Structures are given as C-alpha cells and as structure tokens.
Amino acid sequence: MSPRAPTNLMKKEAVRDFPGDSTEGLAFLEALLTPPRYPACLLWTQGERPSPFPFEAPPYDAALPWLPSFVTRVSPESEPGRHPLHEAGAYYCLDFSSVWAASALLEVTHQSGTIHRVLDLCAAPGGKSVFASLALNPAFLLSNEVIGKRLAILRHNLARCRIPNAHTQRLDPRDLATLASDAFDVVIVDAPCSGQSLIAKGIENPGAFHPSTVKGNAKRQTGILTAAASCVAPGGWLLYSTCTFSERENEGPITRLLERRPDFHPIAVPHLEPWRTTHAEFPAYRLYPQSRLGAGAFAALLRRGSEETKQSQSVWDDSLQAYPVRPAAQ
C-alpha cells in the first residue's frame, strides 16, 4: 500500500506548528501518515513487576529517567492486553502519549504533601485515574464519565486493577462545579478533542483537522475547563491534556481560563521541558509523533493560589460518594 498523501489542512497544521522549519514539518507529516508501532506502557497496579518478566522489554526507559517505577515500556509486539496478568489486574495498558501527559502529576508530588481528593473529570476508560492513584495515592478518587457505555468500561477497569478509594459518577461538569466547589486537591481534565494524533496510530479520523471540528471542540473544552477550575481547592492543582495538535484546542482554552481566573498560575514541569510549546509564553508541553515516543499529546499543569483560603467556601455533596468501586476478587 502506498503512503497516504497529507491533506491541505494537515500541511497547514505543519506550517503552524513548525514555522520556518520545513524539515521538522515534513517529519511531522511523515510520522502522522506512516506511523511506527510505538512501545506500549504497563502501569503496575499491585506493586513491583513480576520476575521473571513475561514480556520483551528492550532498554527503552534508560533515556527517560523520569518515568516512575510503576511504569514499564514494552515492545508493541508483546501484546500485553492478551496476557492473563492483564485480566488479573496486575497492570493497566496505556499508550506512551497518555503516560507522558499524566506524568505532569509527578510535579504535584514534588510540591505538595498528602493528597486527599482527586477528580478525573473525563475519566473513561480509566488510564489517567489509574496513573493518578499510583502517583498520588489519594484518600478519595472520583472518576467521572458522562457517557453510559464508557462509564461501564471505566468501572470495570478500576475494579479489575483494584484501585483503592475509587468512586464513579456520571455528571455534567457544570453540575460537579456546583456539588464540589473548591473541593478537590487535584482535578484532571483529559478533554474530549479532535483527536488528530489518532491518525498517527493508524486510526482513520476524517475531519480531525477541519476548522469546524476544531472550533466545536475548543468551545466544549473551554466550558469543561471552566467547570473543572471551580472544583479546585485553593492551593490545588489542575491538569489539562488532549491528544490533538491544534493550538485552538490546546493553548487556547488555557489562555482563556487564565484570563478569567487570575488565581490560577501555569506551573513548569522540569522533566517535560524538552517538549515545551512554542505557541505560548506560559509553560505547556507538546509531544509530536516524529519523536518516535508516542503518537502525540498536549499537557499543561496549573495551580490555584492558596491566598484565598479564608474567602473560599468549599462545597461537598455526600452524593458524590454514592458509587464506590469494589475491587475485583483476586
């Protein structure tokens, strides 16, 4: 099969993302349309990985010393999703781009003490929730998903991996902003997006680069992010991520939030600095498929100022604890 040709909209994205660097722009288009097989990531949910190790694991991680000990990259040929250890809940399979974006939470562990409450606002199928549980060890994890079929998958994965202190809800973000105002130490928004990086996984995604698709997603993301910010406690954290390349969906919603909420401040993540965006002056990060690490992602970490503690009125509705996840039997 001959390689696909880039569309004009893809070419325009390459020019926007790599102005004055035609070599990098061409590398982006090539990786987008003739994607390699990226290493898979295993998130070990029950402690250290087993010995002997059941998968082929070339020394991928030597060049990424920031990877936490609960993450292992393995050869894509390993097919870890078919291994009995997967169904037993020993690990969660996650693509590297998602691990890369979620790794911004490691900076939270460097700057904060005990994390009591974590909200994953757009949680299905569960990868970011699993990562947050392992990295932050919260006393209460609320994984929210508005789509019923995806909620069932989310609950299955949390139960299979025996994630402690996990609860789920199916609430509109605006309702959560009312029921849990100023209530969470960490809020994660892995936002619905145009999914342009899916193409770099070999997945057909027609219209992903079309302006109307991007515009519609950016509007929705801005609303979700606004609601998410209302759930963050003073001194708390907000992680925003996508799997797309559009500035309008990435830096755009963050810029609008910072204009509306001056109590939030972008936070630099030292281990992500090699991927710092050129689309904004504030620290935010972009992974592109030509890196050969993953198909692509965006991440930005914000922190709410703590000086408003006395003025803020935290709200907590006990109904948010109504749907705990029972860990699957071993």
Image (cartoon, helix red, strand yellow):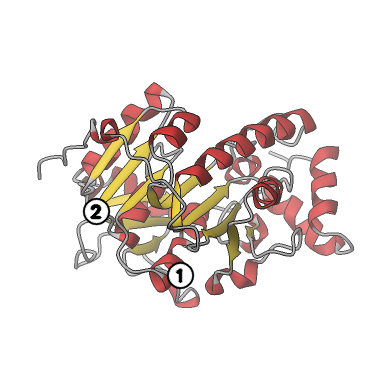
Q: Is residue 122 above or below residue 141?
A: above
Locate residue 156, reporting x and y percent: 26, 34
Q: Is residue 258 above or below residue 226?
A: below
Locate residue 94, reporting x and y percent: 41, 50
Q: Label 2, secondary structure: give it.
A: loop
Q: Label 1, secondary structure: give it.
A: helix
Q: Which quarter shows the N terminus?
A: top right
Q: Is residue 86 above or below residue 53?
A: above
Give the labeled residue for mark 1. 60
* In the image: residue 237, left or right of residue 11: left
Q: Which quarter shows the C terminus?
A: top left
Locate residue 163, reporting x and y percent: 23, 48
Q: Nearer the viewer, residue 235 or 287?
A: 235
What's under tag 1, amino acid-wise?
A: Tyr
Locate residue 222, reporting x and y percent: 63, 38
Give the labeled residue for mark 2. 139
What's under tag 2, amino acid-wise?
A: Ala
* In the image: residue 35, left or right of residue 109: right
Q: Residue at x 45, y 73 (%)?
A: 66
Upstream in the sequence, badge 2 or badge 1?
1
Q: Is residue 6 visible?
A: no
Q: Residue at x 64, y 45 (%)?
A: 244
* In the image: residue 77, left or right of residue 54: right
Q: Residue furthest right?
A: 20
